[in-house]
Image (spheres, helix red, strand yellow):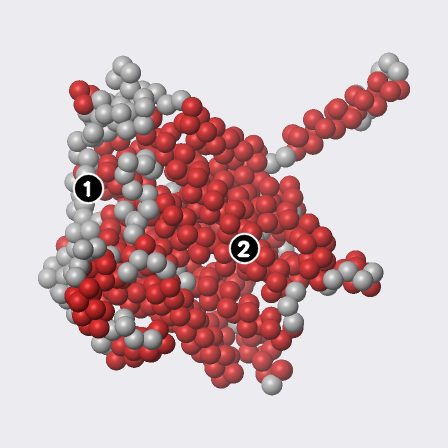
């Protein structure tokens, strides 16, 4: 880089080049990463903020101001039919969304990748049927499991979380199997065995770190899916129950107000879309950075 | 080809068996007693015992499971306790709207996504190709039920062009029937189209790097011509698999959409039964829907063998 090169002492120049390249590297990161990261940060921030501050206390009914329009003094986005402040409701909805998606994604990732690793490391004869088993799990529409669970256990956050886990475990397992098998075929794995390492050790210390970029990307996309599913279940009435706030249930309540207060449905809907989009973009950006080969060939 | 078909059939049966066991185990192993739900907590022990006998849940689990499977095969699934309908006939009766909805969704989203995805892939390095991809990303993030509500608001409430919900059987009023399905089908196809478009784009970008595209261009085809004549056909093979995997997604979308538009289909039935805690109805419905998805997957698998000669050749070579 002749333009930025020697000026002053040699160490100074070196530092400048280093700073310059770091800046360049940051700028070369995909824009989706920044955009997705920003949306995800906003979502998490709002959800956490709701624990310490909301414009009104949770479930505070402003009975004089029911269905107040956006911009009414004291109610930035207006109030719903029961007089609850929309901003407060959205913040509490973000909290519930975050809670369900964190729990379900973490559990599904850990279980799913463990199953995937176990299958990849299993005996060659067992691999075919076991992979088929995972495929059968993939073909099962997850919403059915959610509804069966809800019929048995009753609606609620626990049901929704369990359903999302059941839905995502086969996905995580299926995505893990292929790459894990590729890593297992590499020379250094052979070397580790030669060194006397046992299979579980090789799996955790060698295979897992090598497929972790893929798992990080998958985790981000699974977060987006979890948020959409939570909203759908709450919308159908089989997710979280009153008085806990949820974007999906909020949307359900606005359905009967399409004539009286059509603007109400925009807020929870936009919240869902922006959050899911944030995680999807983040996953896309992370894939470009962490897993260039996959990103170029696309499918993952 | 026969080998391929037989193997697909084996997979279908295997998956159906696993799926039915999963549903059955979920229903019977988890806490919560069906009888308590039906009779309430204060029911007399004698009534509880009678109900358990009547429902057949006092028998061993394996017997119950086999009895249920026989019911599915012979069309005898019992009656709903809450509503009193015959479960099997109710499922058959409700199949219509769901099939129209899902098939209509596929009919729109497959051609549309082929066009959009190919366009995006040919222009992958230009801004206009990127825009299609970003729009698809947004489309994936829109929940189907919100799309449905937006469509109702614009076309139903504001413009008043189309009904906001409800279902008209085709035999009663063909035009009204079509009108009642336009918005639901649109809402359902939005997300599916977005997902497909991204897959088409990826598959097409891959195919465009193949040697035969370069050869075609060397023989005088334009880039676009090569893509349309050779690219789409080759890219559509992996797409068939993706489409099959999306059937489950499509059904899930249909369940939600039917509830937005109050369509009397399978999806509405299963949600109503769920909210009424009718475990037996939900269990059978879940299995029936799963079987539909699996049979569709099976058909796609067979079609795949016809579409791609390489699969047949590989098997001939192995045999």
Q: Residues within 10 Å of mark 1 (few under 14, many from 20)?
A: some
As rendered, which of B44 and A133 lies closer to the eye? B44
In the figure, is residue A255 to the left or right of B246? left
Residue under pointer 2: A111
How crowded pointer 2 is (Cα within 10 Å; few <14, some 14-19, many 20+) is rated as: some
Q: Are marks 1 and 2 on the same chain?
A: no
| Closer to the camera in the image, A19 or A157 | A157
Labels in figure, total: 2
Q: Which residue is mark 1?
A: B156
Q: Quadrant of residue A128?
A: bottom right
Q: Can residue B44 be seen in this snapshot?
A: yes
Q: Name the residue located 55 percent from the left edge and 69 percent from the top edge.
A: A130
Task: Classify B66 as above or below A24.
Answer: below
**Horizontal and vertical percent position of residue B53:** 22, 73
Q: Residue furthest front?
A: B45
Residues A260 and A251: in front is: A251
Query: Position of B159 compared to B240: left or right?
Result: left
* Mark 1 or mark 2, whichever is nearer to me: 2
For mark 2, give the secondary structure. helix
- Which residue is rendered at x = 19% and y = 72% of the image? B54
Residue B59 in percent (x, y) is at 30, 75
Question: Toward the viewer: A16 or B26?
Answer: B26
Residue A232 location (% of width, % of height)? 34, 46
* Pointer 2 chain: A
Which picture quadrant has residue B75?
A: bottom left
At mark 1, the secondary structure is helix
Q: Is residue B9 above or below residue B177?
A: below
> Residue at point 18% right, 45% down?
B164
Quadrant housing the C terminus of chain B: bottom right
Read off the chain for label 1: B
Q: CA distance from mark 1 to mark 2?
A: 45 Å
Task: State whether residue A293 appears in this view.
Answer: no
């Amino acid at each position: 880089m002749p333009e930025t090169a020697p000026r002053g002492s040699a160490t100074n120049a070196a530092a400048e080049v280093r700073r310059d390249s770091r800046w360049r590297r940051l700028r070369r990161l995909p824009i989706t990463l920044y955009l997705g990261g920003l949306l995800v940060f906003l979502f998490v921030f709002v959800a956490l903020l709701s624990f310490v501050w909301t414009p009104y206390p949770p479930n505070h009914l402003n009975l004089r101001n029911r269905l107040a329009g956006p911009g009414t003094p004291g109610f930035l986005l207006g109030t719903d039919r029961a007089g609850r402040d929309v901003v407060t409701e959205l913040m509490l909805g973000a909290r519930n969304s975050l809670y369900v998606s964190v729990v379900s994604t973490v559990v599904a990732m850990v279980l799913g990748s463990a199953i995937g690793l176990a299958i990849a490391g299993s005996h060659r004869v067992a691999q075919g049927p076991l992979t088929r088993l995972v495929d059968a799990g993939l073909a099962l529409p997850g919403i059915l499991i959610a509804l069966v669970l809800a019929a048995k256990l009753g609606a609620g956050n626990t049901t929704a979380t369990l359903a999302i886990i059941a839905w995502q475990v086969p996905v995580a397992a299926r995505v893990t199997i292929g790459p894990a098998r590729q890593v297992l075929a590499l020379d250094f794995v052979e070397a580790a065995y030669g060194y006397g390492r046992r299979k579980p050790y090789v799996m955790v210390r060698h295979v897992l770190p090598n497929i972790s970029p893929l798992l990080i990307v998958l985790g981000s996309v699974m977060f987006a899916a979890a948020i959409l599913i939570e909203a759908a279940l709450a919308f159908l009435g089989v997710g979280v129950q009153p008085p806990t706030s949820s974007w999906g249930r909020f949307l359900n309540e606005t359905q009967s107000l399409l004539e009286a207060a059509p603007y109400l449905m925009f807020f929870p809907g936009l919240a869902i879309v922006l959050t899911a989009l944030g995680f999807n973009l983040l996953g896309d950006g992370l894939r470009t950075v962490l897993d260039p080969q996959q990103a170029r060939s696309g499918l993952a | 080809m026969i080998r391929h078909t037989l193997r697909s059939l084996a997979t279908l049966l295997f998956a159906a068996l696993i799926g039915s066991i999963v549903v059955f185990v979920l229903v019977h192993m988890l806490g919560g007693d069906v009888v308590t739900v039906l009779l309430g907590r204060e029911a007399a022990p004698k009534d509880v015992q009678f109900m358990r006998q009547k429902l057949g849940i006092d028998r061993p689990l394996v017997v119950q499971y086999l009895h249920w499977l026989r019911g599915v095969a012979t069309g005898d699934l019992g009656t709903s306790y809450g509503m009193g309908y015959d479960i099997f006939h109710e499922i058959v009766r409700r199949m219509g709207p769901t099939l129209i909805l899902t098939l209509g969704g596929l009919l729109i989203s497959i051609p549309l996504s082929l066009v959009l995805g190919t366009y995006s892939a040919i222009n992958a390095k230009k801004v206009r190709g990127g825009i299609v991809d970003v729009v698809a990303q947004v489309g994936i993030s829109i929940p189907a039920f919100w799309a449905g509500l937006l469509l109702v608001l614009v076309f139903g409430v504001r413009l008043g062009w189309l009904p906001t919900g409800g279902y008209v059987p085709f035999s009663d009023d063909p035009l009204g029937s079509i009108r009642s399905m336009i918005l639901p089908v649109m809402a359902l196809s939005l997300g599916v189209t977005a997902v497909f478009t991204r897959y088409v784009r990826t598959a097409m970008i891959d195919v465009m790097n193949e040697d035969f595209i370069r050869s075609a261009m060397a023989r005088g085809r334009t880039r676009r011509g090569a893509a349309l004549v050779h690219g789409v056909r080759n890219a559509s093979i992996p797409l068939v698999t993706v489409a099959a995997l999306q059937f489950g997604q499509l059904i899930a979308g249909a369940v939600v959409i039917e509830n937005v538009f109050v369509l009397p289909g399978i999806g509405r039935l299963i949600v109503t039964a769920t909210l009424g805690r009718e475990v037996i109805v939900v269990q059978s419905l879940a299995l029936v829907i799963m079987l539909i998805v699996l049979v569709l997957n099976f058909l796609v698998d067979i079609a795949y063998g016809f579409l791609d000669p390489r699969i047949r050749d590989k098997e001939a070579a192995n045999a």
